[in-house]
C-alpha cells in the first residue's frame, strides 16, 4: 500500500483535510478520489454531529491540485469506464464539501487546474498565495468540466465569463480571482499557512452555533420577506440559548471633538 494521497486530521473543532503532495501536484487518480471520498464522508459525519466548527483543505507539494492524473488516464484500457468510477467518488466528495454545515476554508498555492477548481468553488473562504495561479485545463485536454465546476462557476461569475474562462484556458493569477469573488484574499507565499491558521483559530473561538447559523443564513435561497422571518427566528433562538447576553463595546468615532 502506497503513501496516502489525502489525510484527514481532527484537532478539537477543526477538521483538516490535507492533499499530501504525491508527485508534487496532487494529481487526482483513482486512489486519490477514493481517499477523498473517505475523508469527506468522515468530516461530514463529524460536522453534522456538531463536533466541528470549521473544515480546512490545504496541500503539500509544489502545487495545490493540478486536476486529473492524465498519465493514469492514458494508461487505462477503458477510459470512459475509468472516468465513471472516478467521478462517483470525486462528485460525492465535492457535493459534501459544498453542503458542509460549517465554513470550509481552503488554502491554495502553486497551480490549480481542472478538478482542483472544485475545491475552490466549494469553499466559503479561499486564501491564496501571491504566486498561485489557476487554469481550467479541461478543453486543452479534450475533456469537459467535472467536480461541479460547470455548475458552480457560472453561478459565481456569470455564464458568459465562465464559458470564456473554461474554453480559452488562460492562466489566471490569484489577484484576478479576487476580483471575481472566487478568492477571498491573497497573502505572501511564506505567510499562507500562518494566515490560514489565524483565520481558523478565530472561527473556532466563536460560538459554534453562531458560526453554523450564520453560514446557513448566508447560503439560504429564499425571498427577502421569508429571509427576514428566518433571521428574526434565528437571532431570537440564538439569544435564548446563550448563557448571557454579549457585552457590546462601540468605539467612539475618531476625530470627534470632546
Image (spheres, rainbow, N blue to C red):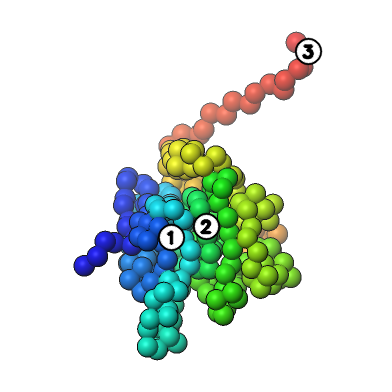
How far apart are the alpha carbons under marks 1 and 2? Answer: 8 Å
How far apart are the alpha carbons under marks 3 and 2? Answer: 52 Å
Residue drawn at x 77%, y 17% is: 256
Alpha-carbon neighbours of circle 1 within 10 Å: few (<14), some, or many (≥20)?
many
Among the two numbered marks 3 and 2 on one chain, the one whose residue lies closer to the N terminus: 2
Residue drawn at x 67%, y 53% is: 176
**On screen, 76 above or below 39?**
below
Q: Are marks 1 and 2 in contact (CB under 8 Å)?
A: yes
Is label 3 or label 1 in front?
1
The residue to which callout 1 is attached is: 25
Which picture quadrant has residue 8? bottom left
Disc number placed over residue 111 in the picture, else none: 2
Does any portion of residue 45 appear in the rendered image?
no
Q: Position of residue 60 (x, y in %)?
A: 39, 52
Disc number placed over residue 4 in the picture, else none: none
Residue drawn at x 50%, y 34% is: 245
The C terminus lies in which quarter of the figure?
top right
Q: Residue furthest right?
A: 257
The residue to which callout 3 is attached is: 257
Q: Between residue 75 and residue 39, name the one nearer to us.
A: 75
Q: Position of residue 66 (x, y in %)?
A: 48, 63
Amino acid at each position: 500500500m502506497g503513501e496516502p494521497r489525502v489525510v484527514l486530521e481532527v484537532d478539537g473543532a477543526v477538521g483538516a483535510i490535507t492533499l499530501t503532495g504525491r508527485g508534487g501536484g496532487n494529481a487526482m487518480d483513482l486512489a486519490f478520489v477514493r481517499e477523498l471520498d473517505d475523508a469527506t464522508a468522515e468530516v461530514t459525519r463529524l460536522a453534522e454531529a456538531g463536533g466541528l466548527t470549521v473544515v480546512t483543505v490545504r496541500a503539500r507539494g509544489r502545487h495545490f491540485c493540478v486536476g486529473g492524473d492524465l498519465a493514469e488516464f492514458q494508461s487505462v484500457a477503458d477510459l470512459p469506464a475509468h472516468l465513471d468510477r472516478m467521478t462517483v467518488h470525486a462528485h460525492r466528495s465535492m457535493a459534501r464539501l459544498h453542503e458542509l454545515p460549517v465554513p470550509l476554508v481552503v488554502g491554495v498555492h502553486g497551480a490549480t487546474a481542472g478538478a482542483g477548481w472544485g475545491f475552490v468553488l466549494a469553499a466559503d473562504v479561499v486564501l491564496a498565495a501571491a504566486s498561485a495561479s489557476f487554469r481550467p485545463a479541461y478543453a486543452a485536454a479534450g475533456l469537459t468540466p467535472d467536480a461541479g465546476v460547470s455548475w458552480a462557476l457560472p453561478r459565481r461569475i456569470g455564464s458568459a465569463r465562465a464559458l470564456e474562462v473554461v474554453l480559452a484556458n488562460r492562466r489566471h493569477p490569484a489577484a484576478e480571482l479576487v476580483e471575481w469573488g472566487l478568492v477571498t484574499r491573497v497573502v505572501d507565499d511564506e505567510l499562507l499557512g500562518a494566515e490560514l491558521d489565524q483565520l481558523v483559530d478565530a472561527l473556532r473561538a466563536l460560538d459554534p452555533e453562531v458560526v453554523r447559523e450564520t453560514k446557513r443564513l448566508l447560503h439560504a435561497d429564499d425571498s427577502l420577506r421569508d429571509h427576514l422571518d428566518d433571521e428574526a427566528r434565528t437571532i431570537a433562538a440564538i439569544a435564548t440559548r446563550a448563557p448571557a447576553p454579549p457585552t457590546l463595546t462601540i468605539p467612539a468615532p475618531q476625530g470627534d471633538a470632546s
